[in-house]
Image (cartoon, grey):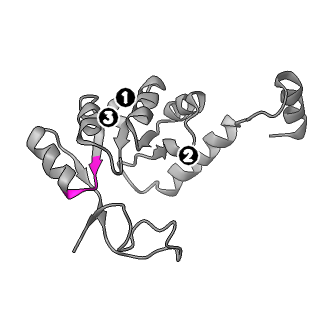
Amino acid sequence: MKKSKLLETAKKFGTPAYIYDTTKISSQYKRLINSFNSVKKLQIYYAVKALSNLSILKFINSLGAGIDTVSIQEVIIGIKAGFSPEKIIYTPNSVSIDEISKVSKMGVKINIDNLNLLEQFGNLYPEIPVCIRINPHVMAGGNNKISVGHIDSKFGISIH
């Protein structure tokens, strides 16, 4: 975005302000899609926790992306932004069976990363398919605070 456009926007709306460049978002999305052009059934999912701005989510939906959510609130925001339930993945961590039950009625794809929760959900809703998140116990990235696959991570069902 050119400096003149930023200054014009600041003058019109005041500062501080958040300014999102949909041209840049679109070009980056297309760049990502093109990087995987050999994949026949590619679907990109945007993590709502990165930015839950309703206007941006509507724009991302218009590009063809799906969304990855971590809470029922993010699922609701996604539906308000126009995402169909089939394009929403719900990947919670440490939530109640009550929340997962409510989300399951919305028709979104569900990831479960806890054996106890998986058993509870399976007993209540044996007809609803779910994905499971496995913890492979692989340290990647070199930083325990941000790595999600190491043995002490709270994410995923342990393979041991």
- Find residue 134 and report its horizontal and vertical position in percent: 28, 63
Taking the spot 14% from the left edge, 46% from the top edge, the residue there is: 120
| C-alpha gap between disc 1 and disc 3 | 5 Å
Q: Nearer the viewer, mark 1 or mark 2?
A: 2
Badge 1 is on which residue? 84
Q: Quadrant of residue 107?
A: top left
Q: Amino acid at mark 2?
A: Ala
Task: Please report whichever mark, 2 or 3, sits nearer to the chain's N-terminal start.
Answer: 2
Mark in front: 2 vs 3: 2
Residue 126 visible to an observer of this rendering: no
Label 2: how many Cα within 10 Å (few below 14, some 14–19, many 20+): few
Who is closer to the viewer here, 85 or 15?
A: 15
Q: Could you tell whether 144 is left or right of 102 in the image?
A: right
According to the picture, the residue beneath numbered tag 3 turns out to be 86
The stretch of residues the image draws in magenta is 111-115
Q: Position of residue 43 (x, y in %)?
A: 40, 46
Q: Is residue 80 left or right of residue 96?
A: right
Q: Quadrant of the C terminus?
A: bottom left
Vertical relation: 119 (above or below) 18: below
Q: Are marks 1 and 3 in contact (CB under 8 Å)?
A: yes
Q: From where the camera sits, is residue 30 visible?
A: yes
Q: Is residue 160 above or below residue 24?
A: below
Between 113 and 20, the one nearer to me in the picture: 113
